[in-house]
Amino acid sequence: MVIGPNDVVRQKYDLLIVDESHRLQRRKNIMGYGAYDTVNKNLGLDKDATQLEWIMRSSKHQIFLYDKNQSVKPSDIRPEDFQKLNAKEYTLNTQMRVEAGEEYIKFIEDIFDLRKPEKTEFKNYDFKIFDNIVSLVKEIKTKEDEYKLSRVVAGYAWPWHTKSGSKSIQKHDIEIDGMKLMWNSTAQDWVNSPNAINEVGCIHTVQGYDLNYVGVIIGPEFSYNPITKKFNVDKSKYFDTNGRNGITDPNELERYIINIYKTLLTRGIKGTYVYIVDENLRNYIKRVLNPVIVVTQIQFNKEEVKSPYQMETIKIPLVGSAPCGNPLMGEENIEEYIDVSKNKIRPGAKYFIVRADGDSMNKAGINDGDLVLCRWAEKGETGDRVVALLGGENVTIKYYDKRDGRRILLPKSTNPQHQPIIPEEGDSVQGIVQEIIN
């Protein structure tokens, strides 16, 4: 009762129900062009007809279960092919696989659509980000012992050296921080194969499967740029030949890779564990999971007494670079937290740290790469070294002054190229420089 597209064309059906219909193919990057062309010829279709057209020619009625977000390679049917059907559309409102339900599915979609998720915690669902690949693999094996059907999967970001017929002498495929792993040894029903717990599956081995726990490795082909706040795809690190050949538009490849990770991250019924190779992407997703305010309000307990031999510190957020020169885009997101001695902090003040970039304030003691401790402030006074936000996105450190009744931001540099800046409407002071910290 369950057949593939090549079998469908052998007879006529009253009704065909097509599950995973986003995996129907078109004539691009496929195996067996000759057989594909023969089917089109026998059905009276042109050479470039799709498997969707095979279904339509072979049945009176059709039901397609379709998710464009699970289209992961160029050979997949295009969304516009389904739109041309002018079919009756129904939305499946209940996701039966993941116990966290639709809220979790929406959470994953929001992360990869660069939207702020409405919810980041899910009752009775085990979602974790791992900083160590060894720990993730160990945890998945523990879940396999407890629940069964627990597997490690990854984006196709490593070549398949151990594939049958490969001439490579390398005995592993994936190496992360010294840990060596192998891709799936079989493409047929890998999830249920005897050695699957010791291997790593890819999208082609788990699409359509349910797992109790899934450990997802997001590979180096997919990264996050904290300056542009956008994802980056490195085509040279994506090794699915049929998934990248013929793609000239980088946005198209990015869409496929995002769909792959959306799919992998929604395989787990009881839990999803994640290891991310790119540190910037890992930090971005961690911030999504634990949203924090850019500035920190420091509060003190006056009755608290500490040992005089212990230096107390406060964690202050590093919020990006302040370009001392031609202003560039400033980062609003926290890069990390810096430990600052508590005796540098004024009670009741709000603090943040920026990293100086350039030489426009080197005569004021602020050099390229310095970490600058700043007090949050809404206005500056003449003579202050201020952190100013220009145009809503560009951050710069300059001296604050007034000339002819107008505000002006002055460089203090050995480089004569740096010129005064006259703030425009909407520009604002974000903080007052307190000192340079080590």
Image: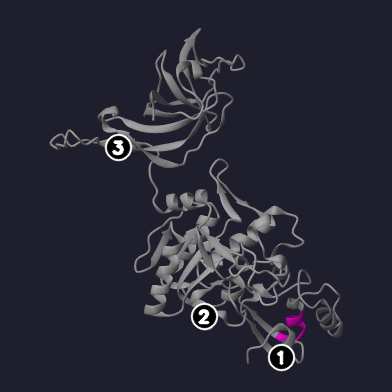
Q: Which residue is mark 3?
A: 314
Disc sitting over residue 13 in the figure = 1
Quick one: SS at disc 2?
loop
What are the residue bounds of the magenta stretch? 54-60
Q: Is residue 277 above or below residue 230?
A: below
Quick one: SS at disc 3?
strand
Determine crowd level at label 3: few under 14, some 14-19, many 20+ residues with C-alpha closer than 10 A.
Answer: some
Query: In front: mark 1 or mark 3?
Result: 3
Pointer 3 or 2: first along the chain: 2
Say which residue appears at 64% left-offset and 67% top-offset: 71
Q: Amino acid at mark 2?
A: Asn
Determine crowd level at label 1: few under 14, some 14-19, many 20+ residues with C-alpha closer than 10 A.
Answer: some
Residue 238, percent from left and from top: 65, 60
- Residue sticking out furthest to the front: 169
Q: Amino acid at mark 3?
A: Ile
Determine crowd level at label 2: few under 14, some 14-19, many 20+ residues with C-alpha closer than 10 A.
Answer: few
Say which residue appears at 44% left-offset and 63% top-offset: 134
- Which color scheme is applied? one colour
Of residues 416 and 57, the one drawn nearer to the viewer in this rendering: 416
- Residue sticking out furthest to the left: 303
Q: State how far apart marks 1 and 3 are (Cα).
A: 71 Å
Disc sitting over residue 195 in the figure = 2
Pointer 1 or 2: first along the chain: 1
Is residue 56 inside the magenta stretch? yes
Q: Is residue 100 among what the camera can see? A: no
**In the rendered view of the protein, which quadrant contains the C terminus?**
top left
Residue 267, percent from left and from top: 50, 72
Q: State how far apart marks 3 and 2 are (Cα).
A: 49 Å
